[in-house]
Amino acid sequence: MRIQRRYPIGAEIIPGKGVHFRVWAPNHDNVVLVIEEDPLKNPKPIYYPMRQEKENYFSKLVSEAGAGTLYRYQLSKSSTLYADPASHFQPQGPDGPSCVIDPDYPWSDQDWPGITLKEGQILYEMHIGTFTQEGTFQTAMKQLEELADLGVTILEIMPLNDFPGHFGWGYDGVNLYAPSRVYGKPKDVKAFINKAHKLGLGVILDVVYNHLGPESNHMAQFSKEYLTDKYTTDWGDAINFDLKPSREYFLTNAKYWIEEFHFDGLRIDATSCIFSSTTPHVLAELTQVVKEADKKRNKIVIGENEPQDSKFLRGYDEGGFAFDGLWNDDFHHSAYVRLTGKREAYYTDYLGSPQEFISSVKYGFLYQGQYYEWQEQPRGCPDLHVQPASLIIFLENHDQIANSGNGKRLHELSDPGNFKALTCLFLLSPNTPMLFQGQEYGSHRPFLYFSDHNEGISRLISKGRKESLAQFPRFATSEVRKMMQEPANPITFMRCKLDFREREENTEIYNLHKDLIKLRKKDPVFQNMQKVKIDGAVLGVDSFLIRYFGEDAGDRLLIINFGPDHYFNPAPEPLLVAGQGLDWEILWSSESTQYGGQGTPPINVPHWKILGHSAIALKTCQEKRK
């Protein structure tokens, strides 16, 4: 019987015929499908020998199976049964049986056009398990209106694939096709995305294609060839993308998230640890798969690439991978040094100087081939013409907050005025800004590393975490080591859950974010930054300006001062001049009392007075008569 399947692997409901199961198991001569016992249907497990196909795939059509059927695989008559590597749901976790899922869902987003990175987007990184106290998609869905009202346009969801235990970041996942049962059921993920689309919010998923988790990863039982020791990563053996079935598993996974759940794209974790000797490179093939899945909607692919290789952003015809965006660590590192004064470990090569921020706004990556002291080698590659929106900038993300040792938020480690000033630059930059959950209202909830593994692995993770943070001399001291939170402690996880009461309490910082996002989206110059010429100038040791040339809409001027009040006199800087018959008027100020400031006096009467620890946005207007 010829079976029409959507995907090459996994369990699929075939209307009117039952369920078709298919798995790749090249290390075995026989595979048996085991339908778990069911009090109502089958009081004992039922064993179905599977038919071996070409290239060591095994398949079986079971007419009695349907949605909700629990099953596992027996490999070469082993007494141990294993979950499907392409399971769509693991109701009892990675070591339990897989569950057949009915893909049908009453979608109402048929007119949703998808997303691009060319429209002035605002990203929002979210961890479902800590975003709400309950840590589920159902409760997270109740906050979508608030995020849309804030001005967020794209949600970036940290990895969903199932993992052992009751909590984790998701980067050590194993069942890559199964949304973790701790967040809800697959239909809850779909309901979340469906509502997000109704509110005008895109949703992308963070996926991990560079390694597999250390516990409950049973893929190697089916085939040791999923991994290879030809390459190494920070987490062990790399994924074997040179082998066709292994490559198919991960590329199908990308397609599955887009088609099955209506995700609007993917964020690819640690791309520098994804290796491929084939042509095309697997990363180029990955972007093609994402873009071609559900062609009615626009999708995006964003990468995390520590070497900051702009090849990722170039098209296929230029030898690139056609990614839509890359995370820009340089901006974060400069901001962190500016706000905290700390220049340890990977912050060594940054000063947080005015020129760094000007260069970041104009050219994106700061390191484009220069020598990088921390790595003792050049970093980055030359490209002064990267589209600004394709670079994702941030003041906080999951990694960087956790790497602060105690998981404190950046606003807790810095001067309030300078934090507001950098928030202004961050949200009015031509790059695409990304907020981390709770950042918009100054959350005091930490974000620590947490993972729920068995005792042996937990000890290794704790030891490895401390060794990793020891690259920062401050964190290598016995005093600091004693106060570090254990990743496996449930209290560590619970401390990271957001408290939305802070949103009502911290209205000054929340209003600051809302107003800046509104300015970015509504002002005729800031909303069109991809086409606006931008220049900048250093005004002093701690101060600088960014000018946006808006032509018919007039110009905008952003002045930032991280130091004390600065009387800029004399003022030999032509970018300060509004123009013939023009003057400047205040558009926005971080010193507004509604943001906790102390007021903004005239700043150019007759000399320029640049307020300390502040940011101010100006726009051109007709010169007022004296």
Image: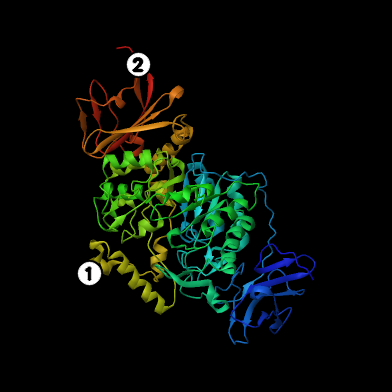
Q: Nearer the viewer, residue 35 or 391?
A: 391
Tell me the crowding category of disc 2: few under 14, some 14 to 19, or many 20 or more residues within 10 angstroms, Cα based.
few
| Picture layout, residue 378 above or below residue 449 | above
Q: Is residue 178 visible?
A: no
Disc 1: which residue: 478
Q: Amino acid at mark 2?
A: Gln
- In the rendered image, the quadrant that contains the N terminus is bottom right
| Picture layout, residue 565 above or below residue 577 | below
Q: Earlier in the sequence, mark 1 or mark 2?
A: 1
Q: Amino acid at mark 1?
A: Ser
- In the rendered image, the quadrant that contains the C terminus is top left
Disc 2: which residue: 580
Q: Which mark is residue 51?
A: none
**Please, what secondary structure does the residue beneath circle 2 have?**
loop
Give the residue drawn at x 66%, y 83%: 30
Whole-Å distance between the Cαs marked 1 and 2?
A: 63 Å
